[in-house]
Amino acid sequence: MNKYSETIINSYTGYFNYLKNEILYPSWHNYFYWLLALSLLVWLLEVIFPWRKEQAIFRKDFWLDGFYMFFNFFLFSLIVFNAISNVAVDFFNQFIALFGGSNVVAFHIQQWPVWSQYLLMFILADFIQWNIHRMLHKSKYLWEFHKVHHSVQQMGFAAHLRFHWMETVIYKTIQYIPLAMLGFGIQDFFIIHIIATAIGHLNHANIKLTYGPLKYVLNNPVMHLWHHARKLPQNRYGVNFGLSLSIWDYLFKTAYIPNENGYEPLGFDDVEKFPNTFIQQALYPISKEKKKKNPKF
Ligand SMILES: [Zn+2]
Ligand SMILES: [Zn+2]
């Protein structure tokens, strides 16, 4: 059997066993239960301290977004991404080995204290993601995929993981290359991932939070609601692109928070016509391409 198909098969069986173990054996190092616990906690905060008081607890698209959460966090990895990315990582590592190992850059991050590696990794990954997110808005082609995330009309925590699976491919691929080239010593991204998930859940929650002066560093629900605003300021393709950190938007002048009332209409022009099921949304960017090429379709 060739090396790459072996990697693919191992990825599938390995991931399947991993997912089974995650569900069967709760532990502190368990994505499944952390996601569940964080979701319940932020949802509970929404119920006790709602920002838009008349918004239903089971808001519009609550279950659809709940499904997205499970699909994007677990199933998509199981079905395709894990297998593809393991092959890509094998391939990439062989490629950088040609240039003398994984540490292409001159400074030696592996020798730093672990906490500082985590911190640098978190900040760097967030900055790369900020740039990718901007690109998803600027490129007409990528925007069609990103529209799934922006099609939410009533905001709540679960909207955080409502996005087209293609975004996972784009984010992970672009992010992996510079981070792998820096040669981080840490293998375990669990803490970073959980912190980013908690901040992302809060950013989409129906809770009015700005974290006081920390708002210039941390993204927050008030700032991110404006990212989802239906009407943009003139000549802008988007505002508030931050994921976990807001600092990039302040540094690069893309921050925009005209008021904090929480009632700005969300979405984009004609969002009412956007498909409202998971399958239709997954196919939307492709069907749109087809229509452009053949208007009679
Ligand atoms: Zn966006
Ligand atoms: Zn969002």
Image (spheres, rainbow, N blue to C red):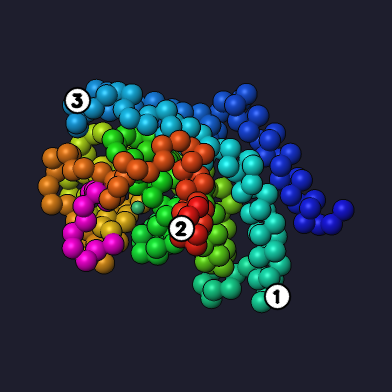
Indicate left or right for 1 with 292 as reference. right
Look at the image and give the residue range highlighted in magenta: 226-237
Q: Residue at x 54, y 73 (%)?
A: 105
- Which numbered circle lies on residue 98? 1
Of residues 98 and 227, the one drawn nearer to the viewer in this rendering: 227
Amino acid tagged 1: Leu
Main SS class of the magenta portion in the image: loop
- Residue at screen point 46% across, 58% down: 295
Q: Position of residue 89 (x, y in %)?
A: 65, 59
In space, the residues marked 1 and 2 are separated at their CA atoms by: 48 Å
Residue 228 in the magenta stretch? The answer is yes
Which label was assigned to residue 295? 2
Q: Which mark is residue 54?
A: 3
Please tell me how crowded label 2 is: few (under 14), some (14-19), or many (20+) other residues with Cα within 10 Å: few
Place of residue 155 in the rendered image (x, y in percent of width and height, measured from the top left): 29, 37
Residue 125, label in figure: none
Cα–Cα gap, marks 1 and 3: 60 Å
**SS state under label 3:** loop
The residue tagged with tag 1: helix, strand or loop?
A: loop
The numbered mark, 2 or 3, whose residue comes first in the sequence reads 3
Most distant residue in the right direction: 1
User: What's the CA distance linking mark 2 and mark 3?
Assistant: 42 Å
Residue type, mark 2 in image: Pro
Element marked by disc 2: loop
Residue at 55 percent across and 59 percent down: it is 173
Mark 1 or 2, closer to the camera:
2
Q: Looking at the image, which residue is at 31% across and 27% down?
A: 59
Q: Amino acid at mark 3?
A: Glu
Of 239 and 216, which appears nearest the observer? Answer: 239
